């Protein structure tokens, strides 16, 4: 395995964890939780799900730029020599990371506080905000993956 193959594999796996996790949560877990659980139980579930999933997202947030910069330096002479689609992907990564940090730092504590206080309307409102931002982030992530798939790096 070449150095580029190793870095590329790490990059793809990190993206898969983040975007695939959002896809699963949005398309599978959310509808199932709505069918199977009442409001309070659903809110408690999401607090636990986010806590576990966000640990893995942080790993992806760290590894994606490290592996991305590694691929740029292994494949090109630097950022300025990288194709435009690579620069677009870097910009979309920044958007995704900003949305994630907004959820993690502002909305998740709001949800957690509401659930601990058993303030179910406030918890539902916080979860609704999180759901919208995760939906936006999922769309951005899918666009990013489509760009990557349409323009292979090697």
Image (cartoon, rainbow, N blue to C red):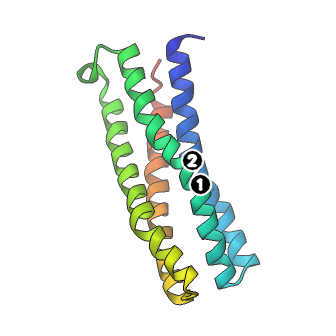
Q: Nearer the viewer, residue 72 or 27?
A: 72
Compared to residue 60, the image places residue 6 above or below, namely above
Percent position of residue 86, x then y? 35, 30
Q: Which residue is mark 1?
A: 53
Answer whether residue 89 is visible to the viewer in this image.
yes
Query: How crowded is the residue under tag 1: few (<14 C-alpha within 10 Å), some, or many (20+)?
Result: some
In contact (CB < 8 Å): disc 1 and disc 2: yes
Residue located farthest toward the right when viewing the structure as drawn: 36
- As drawn, the label of residue 56 is 2
Compared to residue 93, the image places residue 105 above or below, namely below
Percent position of residue 119, x then y? 54, 88
* Residue 45 lies in quadrant: bottom right
Query: How crowded is the residue under tag 2: few (<14 C-alpha within 10 Å), some, or many (20+)?
Result: some
Horizontal side of 50 relative to 77 (left or right) equals right
SS class, disc 1: helix
Q: Nearer the viewer, residue 47 or 20?
A: 47
């Amino acid at each position: 395995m070449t150095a580029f193959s190793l870095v590329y594999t790490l990059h793809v796996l990190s993206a898969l964890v983040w975007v695939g996790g959002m896809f699963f949560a949005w398309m599978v877990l959310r509808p199932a939780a709505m069918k199977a659980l009442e409001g309070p139980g659903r809110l408690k579930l999401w607090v636990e799900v986010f806590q576990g999933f966000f640990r893995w997202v942080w790993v992806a947030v760290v590894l994606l730029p490290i592996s991305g910069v590694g691929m740029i330096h292994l494949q090109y002479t630097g950022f300025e020599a990288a194709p435009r689609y690579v620069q677009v992907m870097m910009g979309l990564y920044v958007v995704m990371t900003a949305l994630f940090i907004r959820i993690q730092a502002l909305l998740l504590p709001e949800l957690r506080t509401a659930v601990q206080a058993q303030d179910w309307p406030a918890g539902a409102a916080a979860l609704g905000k999180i759901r919208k931002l995760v939906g936006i982030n999922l769309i951005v992530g899918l666009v990013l993956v489509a760009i990557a798939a349409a323009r292979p790096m090697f």
